[in-house]
Image (tube, rainbow, N blue to C red):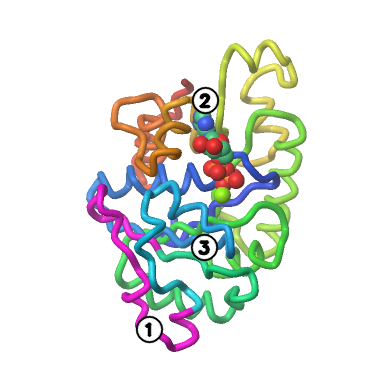
Amino acid sequence: MSKTIVITSGKGGVGKTTVTFGLGTSLSRRGKRVLLIDMENGLRGLEKIMGSDETLVFDASDIVGGKCEPMDAIYPCLSIPGLYLLPAPASPEEGLTREQIRRLTAILASYFDYLLIDCPAGISNEFRVSVFAAQSALVVVNPDPIGVRAGKSVRDLLLKSGISEIRLVINRFDPERFLEYGFFEDLDAVIDAAGIRLIAVVPEDPNLLRAAANGKPCPPGLPGAMAFDRLAARVDGEAIPVIIG
Ligand SMILES: Nc1ncnc2c1ncn2[C@@H]1O[C@H](COP(=O)(O)OP(=O)(O)O)[C@@H](O)[C@H]1O
Ligand SMILES: [Mg+2]
């Protein structure tokens, strides 16, 4: 996939921040330099799951406001070499404009192999700003009808914004619950309903929840981490099959 990837969803709470961090971690373990850009102004979810929320001085608004150099607001993730964070502005009022984020990502692109933009859900102003800076998009959905329909709406918005490289991440997949609910006949039906090419299925894994609560990545070898390793391989251009579970 292209270098600057926005991670989006129609609904909130489906796992965008988890996917951004998991994908970033796995890409870094492949030897890539990865910058995670948090666009959730005021919420700053990424730094919490990266475990770095107490040491951050500058954020994206300080760069565009001329208060610091870009590299002053970029923080290494201490537990994962190659992974970096650009924090979101601390308050919603300090959000960046589309021109500011595009200029900033153009500069940062020369320092990193991938820029992953963790975008707020839905169609807020921050969504539009995030999408403006990206060349490709991952749409995260949980396999339920409302979420999948919202994912399709986001796909339409992305296409309208000129992003055509769009891939689907089905997150929190639990085969037993999936069959029990019976919303969809199979995963192909989810993909058809979203109208987006599949790139990964991430299982429901309590280790992801636990790791996030402790501000750490999911330990390698556990199902959640392995799903992100496969996603990273595909994002990085390896032609490996999508594996479910
Ligand atoms: N595959 C998964 N398995 C278990 N828990 C998950 C999974 N993906 C996300 N979660 C949990 O779901 C909650 C919402 O995820 P988050 O990434 O913050 O969503 P979003 O950024 O879309 O709002 C978090 O508590 C997270 O740990
Ligand atoms: Mg989030």
Q: Tell me if label 1 and label 3 are in contact, CB under 8 Å.
A: no
**Residue 169 in view:** no
Residue 206, position in %: x, y?
A: 47, 25
| Crowd rating for badge 2 (residues with CA inside 10 Å; few <14, some 14–19, many 20+) | some
| Crowd rating for badge 3 (residues with CA inside 10 Å; few <14, some 14–19, many 20+) | some
Alpha carbons under labels 1 and 2: distance apart: 40 Å
Work out whether mark 1 precedes mark 3 in sequence or the reverse, and give the earlier one.
1
- Give the quarter of the image for residue 222: top left
Q: Which amino acid does label 2 sit on?
A: Glu
| Crowd rating for badge 1 (residues with CA inside 10 Å; few <14, some 14–19, many 20+) | some
Alpha carbons under labels 1 and 3: distance apart: 26 Å
Location of mark 3 (residue): 135
Residue 104, position in %: x, y?
A: 45, 77
Residue depicted at 52% across the width and 58% down the height: 44
Residue 80, position in %: x, y?
A: 26, 49
Residue 71 lies left or right of residue 182; in this view the side is left
**Residue 229 in view:** yes
Residue 237 lies left or right of residue 202; in this view the side is left
Question: Can you say whether 161 is above or below 65 in the image?
Answer: above
Residue depicted at 65% across the width and 62% down the height: 127
What stretch of residues is rendered in magenta? 62-85
- Give the quarter of the image for residue 197: top right
Location of mark 1 (residue): 68
SS category of the residue bearing label 3: loop
Location of mark 2 (residue): 204
**Residue 161 covered by magenta stretch:** no
